[in-house]
Image (tube, rainbow, N blue to C red):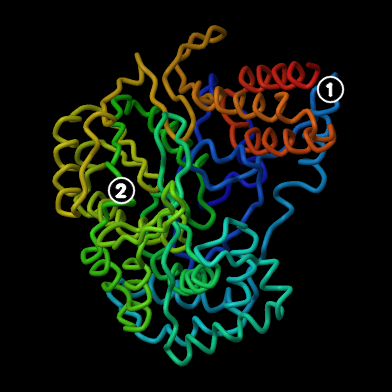
Amino acid sequence: MDSRGNRGDTQGQPYDNERGRPLSMPNRRATGRYKETKFYRVGKGVGFAHSTVCISRRAKPWEREGAILLSCFRRSEGKGIAQNVLKTPEKVRELQRKLYRKAKQEKEYRFYLLYDKVYRMDILNHAYRLVRANKGAPGIDGETFERIEERGGTEKYLEEIAGELKRKDYKPQAVRRVYILKTTGGKRPLGIPVIKDRVVQMAIKIVIEPIFEADFQDNSYGFRPKRNAHQAVDDIRSHLLEGRTEVIDADISKYFDTIPHDKLMQVVAKRIVDKHILKLIKMWLKAPIVEEREDGKKEYKGNDKGTPQGGVISLLLANIYLNVLDTLWVVKKVQERLGARLVRYADDSVILCRGNTGWILKGIKRVLADLGLTLNEEKTCVVDARQESLNFLGFTIGMKRSKRTGRIYPHIEPSKKAQRHIRSEIKRLTTEHYSAVPTEAVIWRVNEVARGWVGYFRYGNCTKALVTLKRYLVYRMRM
């Protein structure tokens, strides 16, 4: 482990929890060096929990496997999920480092000359590559990356965007609303901007993210450079071992849909006073939502609050807004005074306590009320980890006694919901509906899904779940 709490190449590797070897999570030092964001291309399986993916070190496969598993694991060894990394150009990284150092050294400094950086061709080019690597469905205009590249090429397309930004006549288009199924039932709304808006949002993100990274606290792990879900679970594990076993599982009700625009813009403006940057962010927040009705007609709706999930900049804005809670936690010294550790991954939060859970929960509600947010009373609960388990980021976490040593240790395994989801997905891909599809294509798709799931859940006490998944894969492929 390095000085920033990263486990390097062994990140995600299963380890012996029973022997009580916690990963320490030291405070990150201000080095003045902005850390490069790396984007990993992974299979669909990672989507079963909120995650910023970190691929584990891959051990040798089981000795006697079916062809599907050999193909799955060997491909993750060779071409590799982690091999497809988009590196930030050196000039862009240098700009990010300068912005990060300035923000870190001067906590009250407000940045006022940023807009001209957004339409720099190297930044727009890198933004386009990142957006393209993320793939995603078309927006309301139906434009695709293939059509853009066939029509006139990427360079011409980006020059047109740069011209619009330079002349200040760029206007974002409406956001296409789609719904995805939740594993718990119901549907989750997503907002899909057009490709042009995604590219400009990514360019803005490249410029302003280092500024806010300098302000973010070390208890926040979601959708940040060099931070991921496994580190959040490591943090929980280490504090469970320290005796903070009374856990508040806090669920913010419809967070992304209820963020007040005016309050969010006030928080952003504490660091950025460039009026052109603020205008762009406000236009994206106010962009109308387009829903396609069952009769095929499109319905336009106004957008007076929230930041749509699916937008490139939405996750950064969501982190900026909830950083108010994280900062108050540090300023008020809640952890030192009450022994309560807040661990947050985007809008998913747990608070590990040694008591005073009622008092702490009331304080959280007060802060969220000031932000115009509320807790979901049905999903928010207090769990005694010595007797019950909690589910966080797709994992089930609880204290168990080792049958071998008799010691109490934090037991972390893939949740039952996550295991049911991967089995149902594999079953769907191997049903008779796919009988007309070539076997090689079915194997490739199943491998992609299984590889993504294993890449995320191969962590902690995962052996039983992985063995079960292996058996199920072999069973389905032999049918």
Q: Mark 1 points at which residue?
A: 66
Q: What secondary structure is marked by label 1? A: loop
The percent coordinates of residue 342 (x first, y second) are 31, 41
Q: In this view, does 369 lie to the left or right of 346?
A: left
Query: What's the distance in space between the residues labelled 2 and 1, CA to CA?
Result: 44 Å
Q: Assess disc 1: are there few (<14), some (14-19) or many (≥20) residues with their C-alpha within 10 Å of its C-alpha.
A: some
Name which residue lies at 54% across and 7% down.
403
Q: Give the residue at x 44% y 82%.
A: 170
Q: Which residue is drawn at 59% across and 67% down?
A: 143
Q: Which of 214 and 160 is in front in this view?
A: 160
Q: In which quarter of the image is the N terminus?
A: top right
Q: Which one is in front, 188 or 467? A: 188
Q: Percent position (x, y) of residue 179?
A: 45, 45
Q: Tell me which amino acid carries mark 1.
A: Gly
What residue would you read off at disc 2?
A: 255
Quadrant for the C terminus, please.
Answer: top right
Figure quadrant of residue 383 = top left
Whether tag 2 and tag 1 are in contact, CB under 8 A, the answer is: no
Residue 324 in percent (x, y) is at 26, 56
Q: In this view, does 317 lie above or below 367?
A: below
Number of residues whose C-alpha sits closer than 10 Å to that of mark 2, classed few (under 14), some (14–19) or many (20 or more): many
Q: Say if 166 sits above or below 302 in the image.
A: below
Rendering quarter of residue 148: bottom right
Disc with the residue nearer the chain's start (2 vs 1): 1
